[in-house]
Image (cartoon, rainbow, N blue to C red):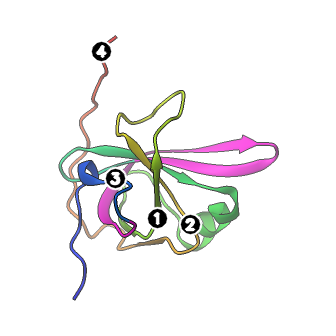
Amino acid sequence: MARKFESVKDISDAKDLWKISVKVKEKWTNVKDGKESTELLVVDEKGDDISVFIPNELHQKFEKDIPISVNNTYTMQNFQVTKNDDQFKTSSHDYKLRFNGGTLVKDVNVHQIPDAVTKLKPF
């Protein structure tokens, strides 16, 4: 039996196996020491968002074999959950996702996820 989709707001480091359906809200590429990595901001159907990091060694796989585009929806599973301790956070979620060699991304545009509402953080 297939696992059910879980909510982004429930993601924590309490377990290893997660399966989410999300829409890519933002995508950008970083270059550090000549190595390219990709970062995403994804949102689920309830409007909760979380940051996703795709390291250099997987950057090519997810650019060529499984291209991830803004405003498309995807099923994502088998990723690492780490603390969101970045100095500049793109999401207020306590955790962020990091793709690894076993991460699966598929089901392009089969999910009904509305456009995300921008959440502004008060100063």
Horizontal and vertical percent for residue 63? Answer: 60, 63
* SS for dot 2: loop
- The disc at residue 12 is 3
Distance, label 3 to label 1, CA atoms, is 12 Å
Write the residue at 46% across / 40% down: 84
Horizontal and vertical percent for residue 80? Answer: 48, 60
* SS for dot 3: loop
Instruction: Verify CB contact (< 8 Å) between mark 1 and mark 2.
Output: yes
Against 90, residue 101 (above or below) is below
Horizontal and vertical percent for residue 30? Answer: 66, 42
Say whether residue 4 is left or right of residue 52: left
Say whether residue 109 is left or right of residue 70: left
- The disc at residue 100 is 2
Residue 49 in which image quadrant? top left
Front position among marks 4 and 1: 1
Of labels 3 and 2, earlier in sequence is: 3
Say whether residue 86 is left or right of residue 114: right
Q: Which residue is mark 4?
A: 122
Q: Which residues are magenta?
A: 16-41
